[in-house]
Amino acid sequence: KQEVTQIPAALSVPEGENLVLNCSFTDSAIYNLQWFRQDPGKGLTSLLLIQSSQREQTSGRLNASLDKSSGRSTLYIAASQPGDSATYLCAVMFNNAGNMLTFGGGTRLMVKP
Amino acid sequence: NAGVTQTPKFRVLKTGQSMTLLCAQDMNHEYMYWYRQDPGMGLRLIHYSVGEGTTAKGEVPDGYNVSRLKKQNFLLGLESAAPSQTSVYFCASSYSLVSGTSGGAYNEQFFGPGTRLTVL
């Protein structure tokens, strides 16, 4: 079974720190990988999508990288702020799974003022 | 643009009751999806649709039915609700699976705000 894993499950950092969230997946044959943010009791907000042919994508203070051969992606958040506190979800579209996204369990981030 | 909207936001049902969740999108997306989110299980795909009049099963389809009579709407039905269907339901939509210039695909999924369903 194809799986997506996110470690750590929870992370607490002081404001201003740069941080990295990790995502690993079991099969390198993917169409794309998407990072989402979810605030408590809310829906998912798409942050970045990386196609399988790309190595990284950037949006503001966020940078996502993709290494298909090792089955890993990282989400780098620069100069973290309390407003970044949320759960971050990684989702992979595997080639043989049609249009289905397989989600990781998420990393719950708290940025302390 | 409202994006993806879901109706209702909250609902409480008794076991055996039926209900329909409505998802609407105004982005002219071909693909639409229904997911459920449960603690410890993450998000799992229930059903999806690649176009008007078409539907397909996802990872956890049992106990649910769907219909896509109009491109902008995707309905999720529970015919006889069970406590195991207590969950938060999310609808999403995207463009079709379009290949990138050198492999990969760009079909970013956009999610609605969710429906919190409790079955007693």
Image (tube, coloured by chain):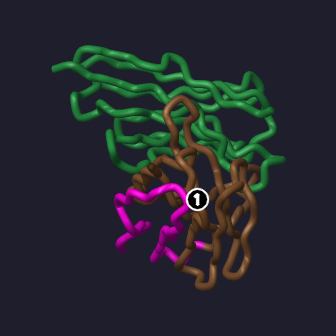
Reply yes or no: does residue B94 show up in magenta.
Answer: no
Q: Amino acid at mark 1?
A: Trp
Q: Residue furthest right?
A: A96
Which of the 4 image quarters holds residue A76?
Answer: top left
B65 on left or right of B93: right
**In this view of the protein, which residue sits in the foreground, B66 or B113?**
B66
Range of residues picked out in magenta = B1-29
Kindly identify the residue that appears in the image at 29 percent across and 30 percent down: A85
B20 on left or right of A26: left
Kindly identify the residue that appears in the image at 41 percent across and 35 percent down: A62
**In this view of the protein, which residue sits in the foreground, A2 or B80?**
B80
| Residue B29 coordinates in the image, percent (x, y) | 57, 72
- Residue B1 to residue B60: above or below: below
- Residue B53 to residue B118: above or below: below
Rendering colour (chain B): brown
Q: Callout 1: 10 Å neighbours few (<14), some, many (20+)?
A: many
Q: Residue furthest left?
A: A113
Which of the 4 image quarters holds residue A30?
Answer: top right
Reply yes or no: does residue B26 show up in magenta.
Answer: yes
Q: Which chain is green?
A: A
Residue carrying label 1: B34
**In this view of the protein, which residue sits in the foreground, B90 or A81?**
B90
Q: Quadrant of the N terminus of chain A?
A: top right
Q: Secondary structure at mark 1?
A: strand
B13 on left or right of A33: left
- The chain letter for the residue carrying disc 1 is B
| Residue B81 coordinates in the image, percent (x, y) | 56, 58
| Residue A69 coordinates in the image, percent (x, y) | 77, 26
| Residue A37 coordinates in the image, percent (x, y) | 41, 41
Kindly identify the residue that appears in the image at 75 percent across and 43 percent down: A94
Kindly identify the residue that appears in the image at 40 percent across and 50 percent down: A43
